[in-house]
Image: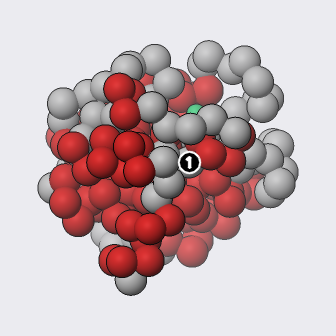
């Protein structure tokens, strides 16, 4: 089953309760996707899982502040949509579910795909005035970007 990405994005965005201007909403998801695809060029991550993480990980946030269960709810939404808006084999799906569920609770993860998901999300912390911390990066490339303080220079050299 090939993934109709525009349809997937529209469906998940339409159910998101906090609006397009939310700091945890679709504009953030797009930057996480962009960051993740850049990181994946060097980390060996599975790009499809990274893209699915981007769209689902914050998709069920109930508020902009303290919402400790939002990763689990995002994972549950991905489970509901598996076989409808996308499909993955069992091992890949387990990786996606882990990344969504634990993206705020785990400091780091050694799996290259999960680590890339976490780093892609944390490298967008500048949107809320937080400089990404290299100590909370899972991948070597993520640490390099965090040390630089911004992903912008890396985006312009890759494009
Ligand atoms: Fe989150
Ligand atoms: Fe996020």
Give whichever of 82, 25 is nearer the camera: 25
Quarter of image, res 130: top right
From the viewer's perspective, is residue 67 above or below residue 49?
Answer: above
Residue at 57% across, 74% down = 6
Give the x, y percent position of residue 19.
84, 51
Left-right relation of 143 to 33: left
Question: How far across and how far down the image is residue 128, in percent?
Answer: 71, 40
Left or right of 149 on screen, residue 50: left
Residue at 49% x, 71% y is 5
In which quadrant is the N terminus drawn? Answer: bottom left
Residue position for label 1: 124
Instruction: Answer whether residue 82 is visible to the viewer in this image.
Output: no
The image position of residue 64, as x and y in percent, is 78, 31
The residue closer to the viewer here, 77 or 84, is 77
Question: Picture coordinates of residue 116 (x, y %)?
Answer: 31, 46
Nearer to us in this view, 26 or 6: 26
Q: Nearer the viewer, residue 22 or 6?
A: 22
Q: Quadrant of the C terminus?
A: bottom left
Which structural element holds mark 1? loop
Q: Is residue 141 visible?
A: yes
**Color theme of the render:** secondary structure
Q: Is mark 1 within 8 Å of ligand 2?
A: yes
Q: Going by the image, does 69 lie left or right of 72?
A: right
Quadrant of residue 68 within the rendered picture: top right
Q: Is residue 1 above or below residue 20?
A: below
**Number of numbered discs overlaid on the protein picture:** 1
State the residue at coordinates (48%, 48%).
149
Picture residue at 19% right of the left edge, 53% below the top: 43
């Amino acid at each position: 089953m090939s993934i109709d990405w525009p349809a997937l994005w529209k469906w998940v965005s339409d159910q998101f309760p906090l609006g397009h201007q939310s700091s945890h909403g679709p504009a953030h998801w797009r930057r996480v996707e962009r960051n993740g695809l850049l990181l994946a060029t060097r980390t060996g991550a599975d790009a499809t899982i990274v893209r699915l993480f981007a769209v689902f990980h914050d998709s069920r946030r109930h508020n902009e502040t303290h919402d400790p269960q939002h990763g689990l709810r995002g994972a549950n939404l991905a489970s509901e949509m598996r076989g409808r808006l996308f499909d993955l084999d069992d091992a890949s799906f387990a990786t996606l579910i882990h990344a969504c569920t634990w993206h705020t609770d785990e400091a780091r993860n050694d799996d290259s795909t999960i680590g890339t998901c976490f780093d892609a999300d944390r490298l967008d912390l500048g949107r809320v005035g937080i400089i990404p911390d290299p100590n909370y990066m899972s991948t070597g490339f993520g640490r390099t970007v965090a040390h630089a303080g911004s992903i912008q220079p890396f985006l312009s050299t890759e494009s």
